[in-house]
Amino acid sequence: MMTAFLICIAMAAVPDSLLDESVFQRTIEQNTDFDIQDAELLLNIGIYHRINVYRVEKGKSTLRWNDNLMNTAGLHSKEMYERDFFSHVNPKNKALRNVDDRLKYAKADFNTFGENIAFFDEPLPDEKTLTNELLQQWIDGIFTQWRTSKGHRKNMLRDAFKQTGISCYLSVENVNQTHRVIVHATNVFTD
């Protein structure tokens, strides 16, 4: 277990070192298994790096990481899981109904904003161990969902967006004696 990362999750901040793509890749390669909390953090950062690589490939500038936006995204990801919905609009919490409501709640400074969401549910070989191969597969899967959706792709490539925060909420559940991982992902962009 990676204790340093767990402390940062509790503080709702990403270690600056992981924002360096080479450090992130070494972390993934050198560790063979992760617990749920470590996996959430690494999934967030892995998707962030994939989006920035994609932006550079398309001639765009990279996005800056913003912990406040990550926390805003995390609020929505957790709400989607706990209140059992999948939508940009929260039908069960009027105070946090839309992304602009959530940004205002988080006291984020913005003129323009966007939001991407993703969901998947798949079997998990072991309820307590998430491998680096699974993490990479999930990073690729979420990124691909967004890249192949016209509206989500537009958000990833929009010139007006300068910063982002991503948060995935993972849950492991036992369904018919099969462990499944359920992931709700939210990506918030602002200028």
Image (cartoon, rainbow, N blue to C red):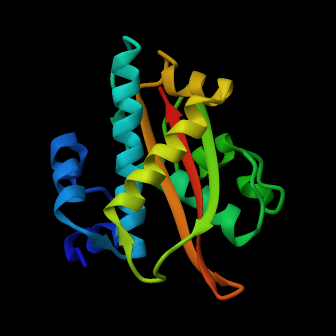
Of the pair 118 and 77, the residue shown nearer to us: 118
Q: Name the quadrant of the N terminus.
A: bottom left
Q: Name the outermost residue toward the top.
A: 59
Q: Name the outermost residue toward the bottom.
A: 177
Q: Name the outermost residue toward the right.
A: 91
Q: Position of residue 78 (x, y in %)?
A: 61, 65
Q: Is residue 131 visible?
A: yes
Of the pair 167 and 108, the residue shown nearer to us: 167
Residue depicted at 48% across the width and 56% down the height? 71
Res 128 quadrant in image: bottom left
Residue depicted at 20% across the width and 57% down the height? 29
Q: Is residue 183 above or below residue 113?
A: below
Query: In the drawing, does residue 93 fall left or right of residue 109?
Result: right
Residue depicted at 57% across the width and 73% down the height? 171
How many numbered discs? 0
Q: Position of residue 73 (x, y in %)?
A: 54, 51
Q: Position of residue 177 (x, y in %)?
A: 65, 88
Residue depicted at 54% across the width and 37% down the height? 144
Query: In the drawing, does residue 164 fall left or right of residue 176?
Result: left
Of the pair 191 and 37, the residue shown nearer to us: 37
Q: Position of residue 19 (x, y in %)?
A: 24, 45
Res 132 quadrant in image: bottom left
Q: Is residue 70 visible?
A: no
